[in-house]
């Protein structure tokens, strides 16, 4: 599974929360891509997610949900809420899951830009 964010800031926050300050030791790149058809994006509303989906660290229910979504191949992309942002404050922010085993996945999106990125954490 490939994880993406609706903004570069959200993607950076998500990865920082997972990996901690060690992310500052490596150079990173932000890849900006375009999905050719918005009908290819499924949406998972917060109330449809497994119980305690936003508990950290993530438990088995979230992992099992992800595995099932990959195997079902219902959509090549799935829009899901962030466990790190309160949706009432950031209603337009979301994560996007990309199913790398979806048939012809490479034909559904296109890389538009690649930018070098560095975390500035003062470490």
Image (cartoon, rainbow, N blue to C red):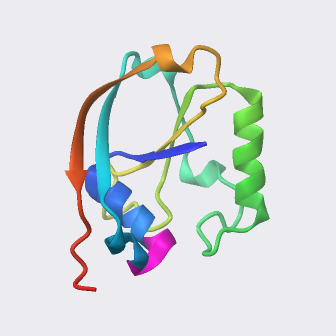
| Quarter of the image that includes the C terminus | bottom left
In the image, taking residue 113 as reference, residue 57 lies left or right, namely right
Residue visible at 60% across and 31% down in the picture: 100
The reply to whether residue 85 is in sight is: no
Determine whether 71 is above or below 49 in the image: above
Determine whether 93 is above or below 113 in the image: below
In the image, taking residue 39 as reference, residue 112 lies left or right, namely left
Measured as percent of width and height from the top left, residue 103 is found at 64, 16
Measured as percent of width and height from the top left, residue 23 is found at 39, 70
Measured as percent of width and height from the top left, residue 53 is found at 64, 63
The reply to whether residue 28 is in sight is: yes
Judged by its main secondary structure, the magenta piece is helix
In the image, taking residue 45 as reference, residue 21 lies left or right, namely left
Q: Nearer the viewer, residue 15 or 87?
A: 15
Residue visible at 75% across and 44% down in the picture: 67
| Quarter of the image that includes the N terminus | top right
Q: Is residue 19 highlighted in magenta?
A: yes
| Region in magenta | 17-21
Q: Nearer the viewer, residue 61 or 33?
A: 33
Q: Nearer the viewer, residue 61 or 17?
A: 17
Q: Is residue 15 highlighted in magenta?
A: no
Determine whether 18 is above or below 117 in the image: below
Quadrant in which residue 13 is drawn:
bottom left
Residue visible at 78% across and 52% down in the picture: 64
């Amino acid at each position: 599974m490939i994880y993406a964010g609706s903004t570069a800031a959200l993607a950076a926050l998500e990865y920082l929360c997972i990996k901690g300050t060690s992310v500052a030791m490596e150079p990173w790149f932000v890849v900006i891509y375009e999905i050719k058809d918005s009908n290819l994006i499924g949406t998972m509303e917060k109330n449809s997610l497994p119980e305690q989906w936003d508990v950290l660290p993530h438990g088995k229910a979230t992992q099992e949900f992800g595995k099932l979504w990959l195997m079902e191949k219902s959509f090549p992309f799935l829009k899901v809420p962030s466990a790190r942002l309160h949706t009432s404050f950031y209603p337009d922010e979301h994560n996007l899951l990309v199913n790398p085993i979806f048939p012809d996945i490479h034909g559904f999106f296109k890389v538009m830009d690649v930018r070098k990125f560095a975390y500035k954490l003062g470490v």
